[in-house]
Amino acid sequence: MHWRALSPRRRLLFALIAAAVAALVVVIVAALMPGPVTAIRTDKPGTVILVPGFGGDRNSLQPLADRIRADGRQAQILTLPGDGTGDLLQQVSVLDKAVDDAIAAGSPSVDIVGYSAGGVVTKLWIADDNGAKRARRVITLGSPLHGTQLAAAGNALAPGACPTACQQLAPGSPVLAPIGGAAGLPWMSIWTEDDQTVTPPDTARLTGAINVSLQQLCPGVRVAHEQLPTDARVIALVLAGLGQATLTAPSECPREGVS
């Protein structure tokens, strides 16, 4: 059937159908395509999101959150699914939503502080959810970014007692294998040589990050893994890192209680 052979009424009908189909295609394509990443203000500090470690203990991060708030920043401690022992990728989804909510609420930028396995969750979020374009900077504390031998031993000796996150934190696990460097994002990784949970302690080292061994900066100090988020020197290092216009390596050990 030729277009010219159609009556004016049928031409109008076909034109309307074609326009409706075109509009529907546009809607479908728009729905399938990812939305634009909201531009963040790297020059303007905003909300700080704190990600707990294995076990999801929020209380361990409370002193640090209180100090951040005392400096005039918003601070939020995440509540992780499965008490922080479940699938790390599900924990990534919680972090992703928290970042979206903070930006939607008007925060000009978002900083992430990840403690222990919370740093691994942060790294996975950076890799999988365009986090490098959505975060201003990251600071991790005693994070087994390349796995911990303790998790490997636990999984080998008592597999039934090693929950999902424990299995995923073993060196070489499928979840950790793709983890690369800092992805060009300002990142400071702090750890303690006294760590007996994250072993070896320098598994916290990350290519492209500012890597800080607490004992190299503060010779002779004794800080265990569980003391990292509450130690006054570590808190001072975190506050200084969050407050700097450009993240730089610390040059001296901070005095306790001084940021």
Image: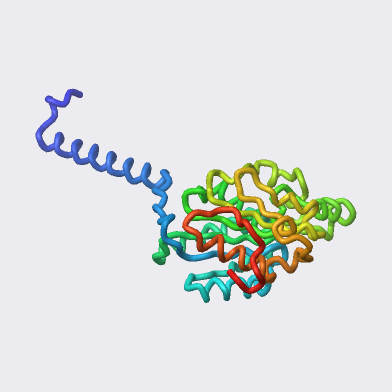
Picture coordinates of residue 169, whole percent (x, y): 74, 52
Picture coordinates of residue 223, whole percent (x, y): 76, 66
- Tell me what residue is drawn at x 17 percent, y 23 percent: 2
Q: Is residue 230 rendered to the left or right of residue 220?
A: left
Identify the image's colour scheme: rainbow, by chain, secondary structure or one colour. rainbow
Q: Residue furthest top?
A: 2
- Tell me what residue is drawn at x 66 percent, y 72 percent: 256
Compared with residue 128, is residue 242 higher up or lower down, i.e. above or below? below
- Tell me what residue is drawn at x 24 percent, y 37 percent: 18
Q: Residue furthest left?
A: 8
Choose between 173 and 232: the one closer to the eye: 232
Choose between 93 and 126: the one closer to the eye: 126
**Does the rendering let one see residue 194?**
yes
**Does the rendering let one see residue 90?**
no
Q: Is residue 96 rendered to the left or right of residue 118?
A: left
- The image quarter in which residue 14 lies: top left
Choose between 98 and 59: the one closer to the eye: 59
- Tell me what residue is drawn at x 43 percent, y 46 percent: 34
* Quadrant assignment for the N terminus: top left
Picture coordinates of residue 257, whole percent (x, y): 63, 74
Q: Residue furthest front?
A: 252
